[in-house]
Amino acid sequence: TGSGLTGTGGNVTFSSTIVGDDATRELSITAGTGAVQFNGFLNTGGFRVNKLTVVSSNTIDFNAGSTSTLGSSAHSITAANGITVNGSITTSAQLTVNADSVTGSGGTFTVSGGTTVINTNGAQLDITADEVELVGASPSLNSGVTSITDSDGGGVGLGATIVTNGLNINGTELQNITATGLTINAGSGGSITVNGITAANSNNITGTLTLN
């Protein structure tokens, strides 16, 4: 029921559709210092990878350009130097994303493209990164309880103030997050600067917006 890929530093590229059986199929990838690229859909005809785990990688790119649907087990993807989503991802399970697993490497979590969205259908979403760029659709993130954590404690800028070497979420990016609750964590030793956030920027957070 499980498929595992382990590399010794080379890149791992999926050029076509990845098919699972939705109930039991698991895909685990350990790329080490290699990059992981998904250039095809992660499902077809209703058949999905039930559990996706990227244990380690240098970077991860989702380049399918359209919606990939993951199954109902918790998913976890990890990269040292950034994760970029160029095609929508939908699931009904918890999704854990770490774009900066090697602290100080500057890993950015990017959701880009006019139609790109990560949709967990109300499930939990946890993101750890050195920086986030939510420049996809509105919403770029559509989830249940959500957390965004600065990986290196460099500080968080929320709104108009840009924190140098920090994790920054401007008003438009905050407005692109739809969640039943959002926690922004400054990380160990970090601080959060809030400036110029409007009601419209935060209205898509239906629960509590917590700053730690």
Image (spheres, rainbow, N blue to C red):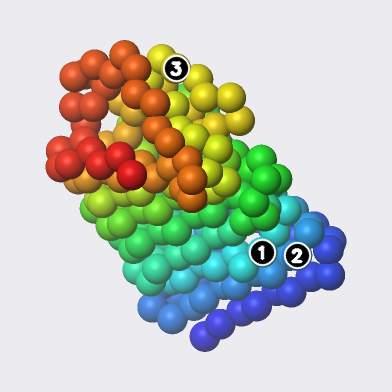
The answer to whether residue 82 is visible is: no
Answer with left or right where residue 163 lies relative to residue 173: right
- Which residue bears the numbered disc 3? 161
Q: Could you tell me if the residues under marks 2 and 1 are in contact, i.e. CB atoms within 8 Å?
A: yes
- Which residue bears the numbered disc 2? 32
- Which residue bears the numbered disc 1? 56
Residue 113 percent location from the top left of the image: 52, 28
Residue type, mark 1 in image: Ser
The answer to whether residue 75 is visible is: yes
Asked if residue 120 is positioned above or below residue 5 in the image, the reply reads above
Residue 57 percent location from the top left of the image: 70, 59
Q: Earlier in the sequence, mark 1 or mark 3?
A: 1
* Residue in front for this viewpoint, 64 or 205: 205
CA neighbours of label 2 inside 10 A, class few (<14), some (14 to 19), many (20+): many
Residue, far left: 207
Residue 190 percent location from the top left of the image: 47, 41
Label total for image: 3
Residue type, mark 3 in image: Thr
Instruction: Identify the secondary structure beneath mark 1.
Output: strand
